[in-house]
Image (cartoon, rainbow, N blue to C red):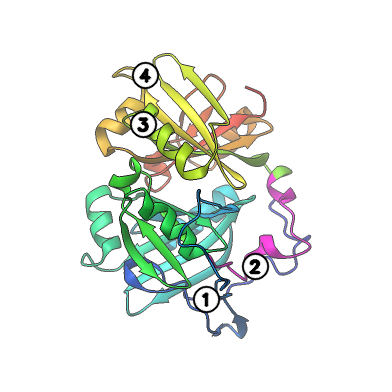
Amino acid sequence: MWSVAARPNAFLKACCLHQRFDGAPCVGHLTKARGVVASMHQCQRRPTMPFMAHLETSKVTHINQVLVDFDEANAHYERCFGALEYMNSYEETQDRDASLFLIGETCVELFRPRGPESLLGQNHARFGDSWHSFEIKVDDLEAAKAVFEERGVRITTYWPDSFFMVHPKDAHGLLFEVCCLEMENDPRLEPNWTASPWEEGPLGIVGLRALTAVVRDLEATTVFLSDLLGQEPQGSAHHPGIARTATFLLGDTSLEIQEPDGTEGPVAAYLERWGPRMRSLDFLSSDVDAAAAHLEGLGLAMIDGDLPGWRGVDPANNFGVLYQLCPLTP
């Protein structure tokens, strides 16, 4: 059973609009939904230099996913992964639905474009149900924007005091969304927040090992991220026949970039099919076999993960995206 007794406000749902994709801003005003008042903090305004040397980010706020069967997907993630939804809204001017939910400490935002004309609709037409981007939190949006622009990265969407997005072709396939806002109804901001229901639940999820992205040139991407973030890789690995990897910290979250090792294997197949882009969320589980058996009991097809002892949820059973369950020790 999934228990939220330790979080009395955990199922708070606020239609905070969260308008950022397709050229609509995160709002700084108050909105009401189901009698609950939600608000978004405006970005900090401070005197800034024209640019800062490196990108300063405190965390990954959430990972964005685009799909069509919105209601079915929300029910799926709650049923199978204990997802805790805290926002669900429809934005009329952009003609799209959005929801935010947590799986442990990890937040995912689902988007459903209701028409093909929007940027999200065009993205879905190209990639189908899939990952879209990941949002990182910064304090100084203007300084962060200058960091990307100074490195020749195009800004595709920009709303002052809110967010911007970069062109993935200028960032080795990585689609950064950069935002200076907190989601005020995020249960993780509550003083009594705990991820223990997932740790103690049937999946034994104790955290996120990494979000992963496939790239064509590991060395070039490593140079780019080292310069952008002002850090050397936190780790690197070579898994023969699978991938060579390097890991960077985005505040509280590990980003693992992967270049296929050879032309066979799951990483190579993903790059061949979709090109360089985000590939998976890799969750740490205290008992991978038990977690996999639980998900199979719910009707999900499980596949071998990237490494021995890992298990993955077949993307065909997970709205186009790969979740992997990884043991606590390598």
Amino acid identity at mark 4: Asp
What range is drawn magenta here? 179-198
Residue 95: percent from left, percent from top: 31, 74
Label 2: how many residues lie within 10 Å, few (<14), some (14-19) or many (20+)?
A: some
The quarter of the displayed image where residue 85 is located: bottom right
In the image, residue 184 above or below residue 70: below
Going from N to C along the chain, the mark reached first, 2 or 4, is 2
- Mark 2 to mark 4 CA distance (whole Å): 43 Å
Element under disc 2: loop
Residue sitting nearer the eye, 146 or 222: 146
Residue holding disc 2: 11
- Mark 1 to mark 2 CA distance (whole Å): 14 Å
Query: Is 110 positioned to the left or the right of 92 in the image?
Result: right
- Mark 4 to mark 1 CA distance (whole Å): 43 Å
Residue holding disc 1: 16
Amino acid identity at mark 1: Cys
Point out the frontmost of discs 3 and 2: 3
